[in-house]
Image: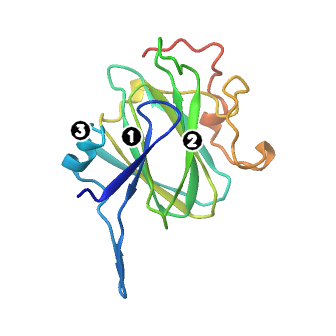
């Protein structure tokens, strides 16, 4: 019996994985990664690096980020404190869902994880102050392959959960290019 269940989102390959929690009077325990169980769910990435971020303010948007070939990355994203609205944008040329996105709310209390395959841009908006996100990637970070798209691009039509004028973004993310001029390397 697997300790994980899966929900397939609107774009094939993007899945939300829910761990089984074992609770008692002390609290709870859950497995967050188990290669054989994830493989049975269709997640076969060979993760090589873990990342951890803290966003102090509710309404912080990080993204939409990706790495170009030959250092593209799949991600397994989980919230360990707080909550986020997590988004994946399909950048795979020839895909029936190219330029489309899907999203899900991830919470520390629920333990949900989002698997984002290679060939997708990824970003999230924090729904609570002091939100911490951890994610595994299957490719090492490569500064020369670091890329992204503008989080608020009307061509992508992402419905972020907070008004645009109340979000906090980095200078780098605010200057990312739009989708109309994007030439996908995937």
Work out how far the residue at label 1 is from the one at label 3, CA to CA, in angstroms.
10 Å
Q: Which residue is mark 2?
A: 103
Mark yes or no: residue 59 visible: yes
Q: Are marks 3 and 2 in contact (CB under 8 Å)?
A: no
Q: Is residue 106 left or right of residue 113?
A: right
Work out how far the residue at label 3 is from the one at label 2, CA to CA, in angstroms.
23 Å
The picture places residue 6, in percent across and down from the top left corner, at 39, 48
Mark yes or no: residue 48 visible: no
Give the structural element (helix, strand or loop) at label 1.
Answer: strand
Q: Quadrant of the N terminus?
A: bottom left
The picture places residue 88, in percent across and down from the top left corner, at 52, 35
Q: Residues within 10 Å of mark 2 (few under 14, many from 20)?
A: many
The picture places residue 31, in percent across and down from the top left corner, at 29, 62
Residue at left 60%, top 35%? 172
Residue at left 49%, top 67%? 109
Q: Which residue is mark 3?
A: 46
Residue at left 56%, top 59%? 83
Q: Which residue is mark 1?
A: 75
Q: Earlier in the sequence, mark 3 or mark 2?
A: 3
Name the mark on residue 173: none
Q: Is residue 120 left or right of residue 5?
A: right
């Amino acid at each position: 019996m697997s300790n994980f269940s899966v929900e397939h989102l609107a774009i094939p390959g993007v899945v939300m994985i829910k761990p089984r929690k074992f609770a008692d009077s002390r609290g709870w325990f859950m497995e967050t990664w188990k290669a054989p169980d994830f493989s049975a769910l269709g997640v076969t990435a060979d993760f090589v690096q873990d990342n951890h971020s803290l966003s102090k303010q509710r309404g912080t948007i990080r993204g939409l980020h990706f790495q170009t070939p030959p250092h593209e990355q799949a991600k397994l994203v989980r919230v360990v404190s707080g909550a986020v609205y997590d988004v994946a944008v399909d950048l795979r040329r020839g895909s029936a869902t190219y330029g489309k996105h899907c999203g899900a709310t991830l919470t520390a209390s629920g333990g949900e994880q989002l698997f984002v395959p290679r060939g997708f841009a990824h970003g999230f908006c924090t729904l609570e102050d002091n939100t911490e996100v951890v994610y595994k990637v299957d490719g090492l970070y490569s500064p020369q392959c670091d890329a992204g798209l503008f989080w608020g691009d009307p061509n992508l039509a992402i419905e972020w959960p907070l008004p645009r004028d109340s979000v906090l973004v980095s200078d780098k993310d605010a200057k990312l290019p739009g989708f109309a001029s994007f030439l996908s390397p995937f």
